[in-house]
Amino acid sequence: MRFIDDGDRFTVCDTRADGHGVTGYLRALNHLTGKIVTLKSWDDGGDSGCDGGNFDVRGNTAHDMVLCWNGGGACVVSRVFKENE
């Protein structure tokens, strides 16, 4: 999963021809509750190329990305990032 700051674009790429896709999640810390919430998700698999979309990452809120292979196993979590970094 990749974040492109110019345009706030996220891409998710399934690079394995194994019959399983991948799902990418954009998450943020809710400062009122202290809980991590999922803001958006994107799926890719079964076609050529990558999928994704836009989400406006704003301000000083801590975000991370999670990439999960839909065939099982542990998900991978990115480092925390903010709009102003």
Image (cartoon, helix red, strand yellow):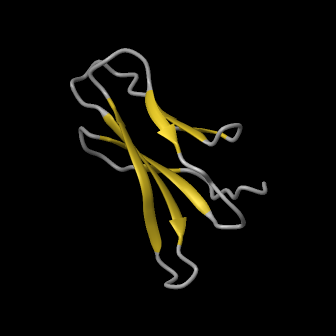
Residue 84 in percent (x, y) is at 78, 57
Residue visible at 53% across and 75% down?
30
Q: Residue at x 71, y 55 (%)?
A: 83
In the picture, residue 61 is in which quadrant?
bottom right
Closest to the observer, 58 or 61:
58
Instruction: Please identify the quadrant where the C terminus is shown.
Output: bottom right
Q: Position of residue 65 (x, y in %)?
A: 52, 51
**Residue located farthest toward the bottom when viewing the structure as drawn:** 32
State the residue at coordinates (25%, 22%).
Answer: 18
- Residue 55 % position (x, y): 54, 48
Q: Position of residue 74 (x, y in %)?
A: 35, 50
Image position of 36 with respect to 57: above or below:
below
Q: How many marks?
A: 0
Query: In the image, is residue 13 above or below residue 69?
Result: above
Furthest-left residue in view?
Answer: 19
Q: Is residue 70 above or below residue 45?
A: below
At 71% from the left and 63% from the top, the residue drawn is: 59
* Side of 22 relative to 66 (left or right): left
| Residue 75 falls left or right of residue 64 | left
Tell whether 71 sits left or right of 43.
left
> Considering depth in this image, is 2 or 61 the residue closer to the camera?
61
Based on the displayed image, in which of its 4 quarters is residue 48 positioned? top left
Q: Residue furthest top?
A: 48
Q: Quadrant of residue 3?
A: top right
